[in-house]
Amino acid sequence: MEILLQGTGSADGIPAMFADSRVSRYARHFGGKDIRSRSAALIDGQLKIDLGPDSFMQAIRDKIEPREWTSIFFTHTHDDHFTYQELQYMLFPFTDLEFAPATIYGNANVLSGISDFYQDWPFELVEIKSFETFDHAEYKITPISAHHRPEEDCVNYIYQNSGKSLLYGTDTGYWREQTWEFLKDFKLDGLVIECTEGRVPTTYQGHMDCQEVMQTVERLRNMGVLSNHSTVVTTHHSHVGDLTHNELEEVLSPHGILVGYDGLSLSI
């Protein structure tokens, strides 16, 4: 299973457009891995996770052919993950397609938002719910409940194929016990996990800082969900976390956690 991290930034990206933070200034000056577009990913070139405001730029930069996507998986309806207006460009008159080639998966809020905007449009919309496994092509996919936004069923996704398992977790917060209990029956070869708050923890429970990420990974390892050979990589970094890419590596690398960056491709 191949996962491409197309974006690894949080809601306002790095450098944040209107911010004069230390991390934004550093990114503007040095570029490279410190430039982070809004979080999104692609599995095996065909399973798209979230369609945010940087999707066009990411596809061009990564030389991706979006017509090859067989699915789009939305995690929740925050704007940096759910730029649903882009969906219209799949179809006639913008293309020669009369039916969207990608099945769209999302919670009730996601599907309602799309249906209200595109009434009777030719999309295949499939509602997903936390802890209910379903199949897409040769993949078995299990949404799990994220601790992020109480007014909707925000999810992270576990993807399984050919004996490999990957959990993509952005906007996780520190999971509630129901999610931890559910995860005990899984063995993960890969974990992509958010690290939004860096070294600046806040009272908001819908995101994690470095310490919480390390606690999450340690707990998963102690449970046997992650092995010593499992790949762990971060995403969804914010400039307000006050850590550059190299500084994040100094904090997380000793704990066997890779720091993700835009364009990173990993084989699980």
Image (cartoon, helix red, strand yellow):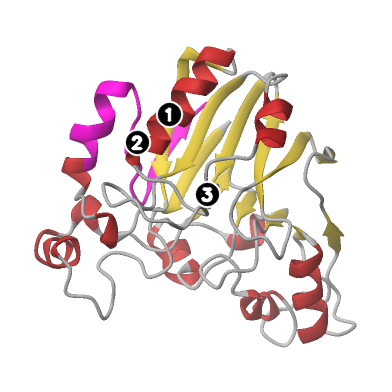
Given residues 149 and 44, the one toward you in this image is 149
Q: Earlier in the sequence, mark 1 or mark 3?
A: 3
The quarter holding residue 232 reads top left
Instruction: Give the spatial CA distance, label 2 vs label 1.
Output: 6 Å
Residue 222 point in image, percent of width and height: 52, 13
**Residue at 59%, 18% in the rendered image:** 225
Instruction: State the extent of the magenta-drawn residues as a range.
Output: 248-268
Instruction: Give the spatial CA distance, label 2 vs label 3.
Output: 16 Å
- Residue type at mark 1: give it: Gln
Q: Residue furthest right?
A: 120
Q: Is residue 131 left or right of residue 181?
A: right
Look at mark 2 in the image and give the residue it sits on: 211
Q: Is residue 101 left or right of residue 215?
A: right
Is residue 261 a member of the stretch shown in magenta? yes
Q: Secondary structure at mark 2?
A: helix
- Residue type at mark 3: give it: Thr
Look at mark 1 in the image and give the residue it sits on: 215
Given residues 180 and 33, the one toward you in this image is 180
- Residue type at mark 2: give it: Gln
Look at mark 3 in the image and give the residue it sits on: 170
Given residues 134 and 146, the one toward you in this image is 146
Callout 2–callout 1 Cβ contact below 8 Å: yes
Q: Is residue 126 left or right of residue 59?
A: right
Given residues 29 and 92, the one toward you in this image is 29
Q: Residues within 10 Å of mark 3 (few under 14, many from 20)?
A: many
**Residue at 65%, 61% in the rendered image:** 76
Q: Secondary structure at mark 1?
A: helix
Callout 1–callout 3 Cβ contact below 8 Å: no
- Work out whether 187 lies above or below 44: above
Q: Earlier in the sequence, mark 2 or mark 3?
A: 3
**Residue at 85%, 58% in the rendered image:** 126
